[in-house]
Amino acid sequence: MARVPTAVMNLIHRFPRLPQAPTRRRRRPGARPPAGPALDPGARPRPWVRALGLVAVVLLGAWLGLLVVGNVRVPVGPMDTTMTLRPSFTGGTKINVSPLGALQLDSHIAPVRLDVNVDQLDPERSRALVDHPERLSGLQDEVTDDIARGTSDLAVRSVVAVVTGATTLGLLVYRRPRRALAAGGLALGLLAASGGSAYASWNPDSVLEPKFSGLLSSAPSLVGDARSIVTEFDVYQQELARLVTNVTKLYDATSTLPVYQPDPTTIRVLHVSDIHLNPASWKIIASLVEQYQVDVIVDSGDTMDHGTAAENGFLDPVEDLGAPYVWVRGNHDSLVTQRYLDRMRNVHVLDDGRARTIAGLRFAGIGDPQFTPDRTQRTGAEQSQELAGARLASAMRDQKRAGTPVDVAVVHEPSAAREVDGTVPLVLSGHLHREDTEVMRYGTRLRVEGSTGGSGLRAIEGTYPDPIETSILYFDRDTKRLQAWDSIELGGLGLTTAEVSRHLPEENQPGADSSPSPSGSSPGASSGSPSGTAPSSPSATPSRPRS
């Protein structure tokens, strides 16, 4: 037998020995207990410490299992959704509708919460509803079946995720199969208890008192009282199905707009206004920018609805629309909105009369002095608009004296626009939610744009939906004067018509004087008939002006 070197033995003896578990020795009857120091009761972990450690392993493993594999993708009607169980102190159900916000329901009391993420609208299933309207009658039953199937799949997957996660973590921590299986069994028991608690406390009336967050905080004003929704669910279901199909129809109408090939020497400006949080507007604007080869987009305000910081994410697509974005603040836009846009690339915010040259045109504008997202009328509103317009007119006169005259002025309300008459050839505005054109007394042309958002999310309040209106303005590259414009009108929710009509300023029509008429009439009325109105696809080219 080899002898261990003395130096190695000395090194081993220097390390303190770990406490060993006491061994039970059988004593002979009448024998005295062995002399020596008493055993340390802290040598072994106490039972409650071991129990807490096991519970911690079970909870952490179950949570990791749910996080990794505890979700299912479920098609619900024309929507693609993801259902997930999450640990929670309060329970309930949370429905995330990106990018609008979230809806929370106090549906149950349990240490787990049901998360439902509405990912996207499936174009093929939506188009099937458009092509076969008779399927709408069975949409409610289809959605109910989809949810039931998704919930069953989620329950099975959650059991597997919780047991697997807890067992795997138990094996890594204890390195004993028996302890790992105990952790898995305890996780299964906790999940079953949570399910039983949710079932016992299930509250089907929770839909009567939903909690909205994000942009959906305005939902009560959009869809009415929740109690009326429940009592008249058949009607509400039909309206929801109609809204789903309308979005698809709107996209289809936009994709088939006529393509116009303008003179390459012209500067093409897309004028939009009063989007009011309609997410479909970005799709429409991007399509028009591409088809009409737009050089710059001008937004005359009310892009938002309440002007809150929660709405700012709605503006993110602006950077990717394919053209510079010129913007002025409307009465539904706040300074929070303005600062958010001002930090974005490719966005040019106009305010206080400061001039900016974009795509060969010099723009100047001023933000709306009123902030009234609740549609209230404050005392002195008209006077404040006139004062803002006067400030803009003064700034543009200074630009003209400096030899850098402004080509286009931009405001939100027409009452402010009237104050710049005679200081600029063209002023653009919005606010009225309807298109209008006139040449004012001193020769400035006022172009009022309709709602490019079809009056936004509030469009479902009225009996008849507002149309989606926008226009393409054509400017001469040398004179920087307006040569013509195309008015584009898409049918609002429930309609699939698209109409494009060409207009010429009065001074550009054959036989007319070279200067615009100072009258208060509307010389910009259509000089050509509409390009066409069809149920599903508009005509291929815009109409030519009458000779």
Image (cartoon, grey):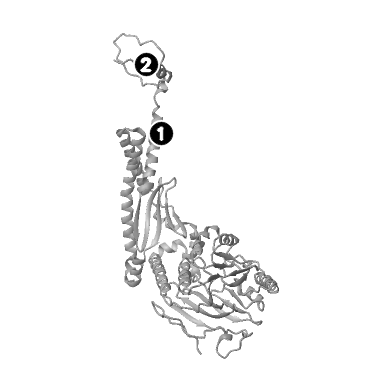
Residue 434 visible? The answer is no
Q: Kindly identify the amino acid type of the residue bearing the numbered disc 1.
A: Leu
10 Å neighbourhood of mark 2: few (<14), some, or many (≥20)? few
Identify the residue at horizontal 33%, vertical 15% (top origin): 3
SS under mark 2? loop
Q: How many marks?
A: 2
Q: Quadrant of residue 21?
A: top left
Determine whether 35 is above or below 484 in the image: above
Q: Kindly identify the amino acid type of the residue bearing the numbered disc 2.
A: Pro
Residue 504 badge: none
Q: Quadrant location of the N terminus?
A: top left
Determine whether 418 is above or below 121 in the image: below
SS under mark 1? helix
Q: Which one is in front, 472 or 262?
A: 262
Q: Position of residue 517 (x, y in %)?
A: 62, 86
Q: Which one is in front, 87 or 225?
A: 87
Q: Position of residue 98 (x, y in %)?
A: 44, 59
10 Å neighbourhood of mark 1: few (<14), some, or many (≥20)? few
In primary-sequence order, the first of circles 2 and 1 is 2
Q: Quadrant of residue 330?
A: bottom right
The residue beneath circle 1 is 52
Residue 2 visible? The answer is yes
The residue beneath circle 2 is 5
Give the spatial CA distance, label 2 vs label 1: 45 Å
| Contact, mark 2 vs mark 1 (Cβ under 8 Å) | no
Q: Position of residue 345 (x, y in %)?
A: 54, 61
Q: Position of residue 364 (x, y in %)?
A: 62, 70
Whether residue 393 sits left or right of residue 15 in the image: it is right
Q: Which one is in front, 545 or 110?
A: 545
